[in-house]
Image (spheres, rainbow, N blue to C red):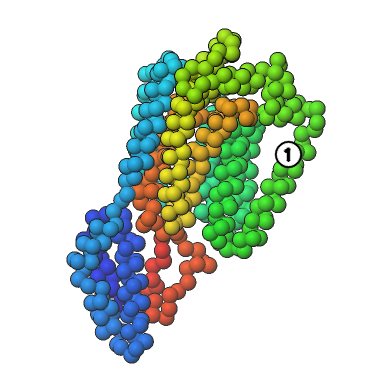
Amino acid sequence: MQAFDTIQDYARAVCGQIRWKQAHAPIAEEIENHIIDQRDAYIAEGMDETVATQEAIAQMGDHVTVGALLDRTHRPKPQWGMILLTAALLFTGFVIRLLIGSDEQWLITILSALIGIGLMTAAYCIDFTLIGKYPKTVYFAILGISVGALFIHKSDVGLISLVFPLGFAAVVYAARNKGYWGIVLCGLSVLLLSFTVALLPYVSGFLLSGVSGLVILCIAISRGWFGVKKVNGYLLVGISVAIITLLAILSISPGSYRWERLRMMFNPAIDPNGSGYIGAQIRTLLGGASLLGPGKAPGEMIQGWLNHNTADYLFTYIIYHMGWFVFMLIMGALMLFIGKSIVLCIKQKSGLALFVSISVILTFMIQAVCYVLINLTIVQISPISLPLISQGNMATMINLMLIGVMLSVFRTGGIVRDQPTAETAKPRSSHGTMEGGHKMQPYKHI
């Protein structure tokens, strides 16, 4: 029997003891590489290749014992804590809306939540590496749906923007080792997606797409993903952002409608009796809020408006009617979810696992941050949603699906290997070639 066939047989025998079949490929590859390294060391000492192979395998140990040990350490990680946190946030939103009576269509809300849970479960169980196998399909499917929504139902583009970061993560993964052109290609893909929400215009969706894209791109550069000097990569991104920002500023002339909208966005007190009335009144309302319990009534008119706009101003309602303490409790739960997710994202060794998981938590985090800033009237734009908590059936379903994708990464991402490119797939050594001319199999997705 050929020497490498013997090694493969041993690796298969070990994997036969491991119940998690998805882990078989990377474990077998690791075992084969380890045995080959030890075999090559024996050969370098003058040992015959067949004998060297047998000695290297013997050194690994009995395949049943080794397989049993690996079976205990290689198992899916369900992340029950994250699942419980997700359920807690979803339940919190449901209870709050029930208490304030902001959602009259309870059957539809419950049905939407159940559909969202179903989507999350499906995404959790499906192999997330399909995103890495078909990155172009993922990206252009999202872009195509967005463009179609522009002509059919424009308001849906804002919700579709929730999956923009996931599409961008696929593009970044596909651009590995493509040099400066890869960075430019990723930048163009962000602009293309952002342009669809900019046409509405929809500032929250634009911020979600632009900020998440910029963060993911910088993370990729920090990992040396494009095969360029990191400083040069950052400079390319920084110069591009500066040029786009400058062009955007030049397009807004003082005194124009856009100029006034921009001023009002950050300071509604400029026109407290006109277009800045709502923002100015909400600031007065927040100023009269208590630490716990209802605040001092600033006027029936603004309270009536707030009671009918809890989808976008749920936090404002909570702060005024329930107190800052309740707001801080909910924010604590959101921050716990975000913080735990970020920690798990950082632990991902695969670029694909990192980009996919970080794209989801960025989507969640940017939604939450924008919602808080808007409800505190720090900025005046339309929010997308407060994930899992505020009213919005479609947003809830999409967010649950995305969380399912992220949890899928956390469950199986530890065994994923990035697909090598021509630049990275280098032969191990002259002994790394199988007898008969067959080369070692490179790392690949599970």
Determine the residue located farthest toward the top in the rendered image: 300
Estimate the x, y position of residue 426 in percent, counting from the top left. 47, 72
Residue at x 23%, y 66% (from the top left corner)? 66
Determine the residue located farthest toward the bottom in the rendered image: 46
Question: In the displayed structure, would residue 43 be above or below residue 357?
Answer: below
Q: Is residue 311 visible?
A: no
Residue at x 51%, y 29% (from the top left corner)? 385
Question: In the displayed structure, would residue 266 be above or below residue 425?
Answer: above
Residue at x 24%, y 70% (from the top left corner)? 10
Q: Amino acid at mark 1?
A: Ala
Estimate the x, y position of residue 194 in percent, counting from the top left. 61, 39
Question: Is 197 placed left or right of 359 in the picture?
Answer: right
Number of marks drawn: 1
Q: Nearer the viewer, residue 312 or 3?
A: 312
Tell me where residue 266 sits by quadrant: top right
Tell me where residue 64 sits by quadrant: bottom left
Q: Nearer the viewer, residue 156 or 83?
A: 83
Tell me where residue 72 sits by quadrant: bottom left
Estimate the x, y position of residue 165 in percent, counting from the top left. 53, 43
Question: In the displayed structure, would residue 163 be above or below residue 16?
Answer: above
Question: Is 417 placed left or right of 47 in the picture?
Answer: right
Name the quadrant of the C terminus: bottom left
Residue at x 68%, y 47% (from the top left corner)? 241
Name the quadrant of the N terminus: bottom left
Determine the residue located farthest toward the right in the rendered image: 254
Tell me the crowding category of disc 1: few under 14, some 14 to 19, or many 20 or more residues within 10 angstroms, Cα based. few
Q: Nearer the viewer, residue 379 or 118?
A: 379
Q: Tag 1's secondary structure?
A: helix
Q: Is residue 86 visible?
A: yes
Question: In the displayed structure, would residue 383 be above or below residue 446?
Answer: above
Which residue is identified by label 1? 248
